[in-house]
Image: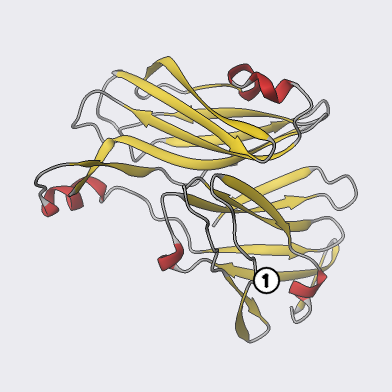
Amino acid sequence: MKRVVTNSVRTLVFCLSTATIKTRIHFFPSAGSAGGHMPVTCILTLFGKGLEKKTVMLDGGRLNQPDGLRLEDAFPALRGEVSGVFGLEVRLSCPQGRVNLLNSQAAVEFVSSTSSMLYGGAAFSPMTEEVDEMSVSSIVDRIEPLQKRSPTAVAVQDASLTSSLVIVNAGPEALKPELTHVAGESTKPLHLGTLSPESVIEVPLDEALFRESRVKETLWGATKVEKMVLPEFSRSPESSYYILYRDPSSKRPVSVCSI
């Protein structure tokens, strides 16, 4: 039998590493107004295509105090020729069992010589552990502060933005994403295939997706918008979903939204 523990929480984000873009990870272990400045351990696990999965532990963290680092300092392989989109698990834990870390936050920053862009990671979820007995009411009370993520996000296509879907699968089994999008007046499934274990993909949302979209005239020109929906049954602590917006000409990341 498994018991939910909220003094050990995790989130899944994605990072970029290219010749011109590097990633910074920022995290804020929080128990709301409680907890003082007790010690907190941060464990980072990096994985993805062309990269050996690696885990590092960061000591010296404190509850209710922000921290962060350049990702290549923790994972030297990112200083080399490795390039692409990678998954990163951020796990925070506090030795005090009654501390609730679900209010913690993580943010990812993409940095280049000319600009930087920061996005908020998906909400932290509680870990589980094996126990002989558990109190259902106690678990409900402890996970109640968890803020649920919005089940929708917006894909945009216009002269200044293109959109892509980034899916992170940290689990040991293949993942078959089941997302839908609103095409005109109807809802249609997105055909995304299967994602390998411990992998990340970026799927460009091309012209075909927006074929039935209504065109909205804005100050900067014609814009097409599609609502992306992730059904509640598709949610899992082993996966996360993001919309990545890029500049069409330079491919520079402009913004990111968690689904």
Using the image, determine if residue 129 lies above or below residue 37.
below
Rendering coords of residue 214 (x, y %): 75, 79
User: Which residue type carries mark 1?
Assistant: Glu
Rendering coords of residue 258 (x, y %): 56, 52
Instruction: Tell me what residue is drawn at x 62 percent, y 24 percent.
Output: 71
User: Is residue 120 something that shows in the picture?
Assistant: no
Instruction: Tell me what residue is drawn at x 83 percent, y 46 percent.
Output: 251
Rendering coords of residue 108 (x, y %): 60, 35
Instruction: Answer with the quarter of the image where residue 185 lies.
Output: bottom right
Q: Which colour scheme is used?
A: secondary structure
Instruction: Tell me what residue is drawn at x 44 percent, y 59 percent.
Output: 235
Compare residues 123 and 194 and report the one nearer the observer. 194
Rendering coords of residue 117 (x, y %): 69, 37
Q: Quadrant of the C terminus?
A: bottom right
Is residue 169 found left or right of 73 in the rendered image? Answer: left
| Farthest-out residue, top | 60
User: Is residue 30 something that shows in the picture?
Assistant: yes
Using the image, determine if residue 182 lies above or below residue 139.
below
Residue topped by disc 1: 226
Q: How crowded is mark 1: few (under 14 residues within 10 Å), some or many (20 or more)?
A: many
What is the number of callouts on the image? 1
Instruction: Tell me what residue is drawn at x 34 percent, y 40 percent.
Output: 102
Q: What element carries label 1?
A: strand
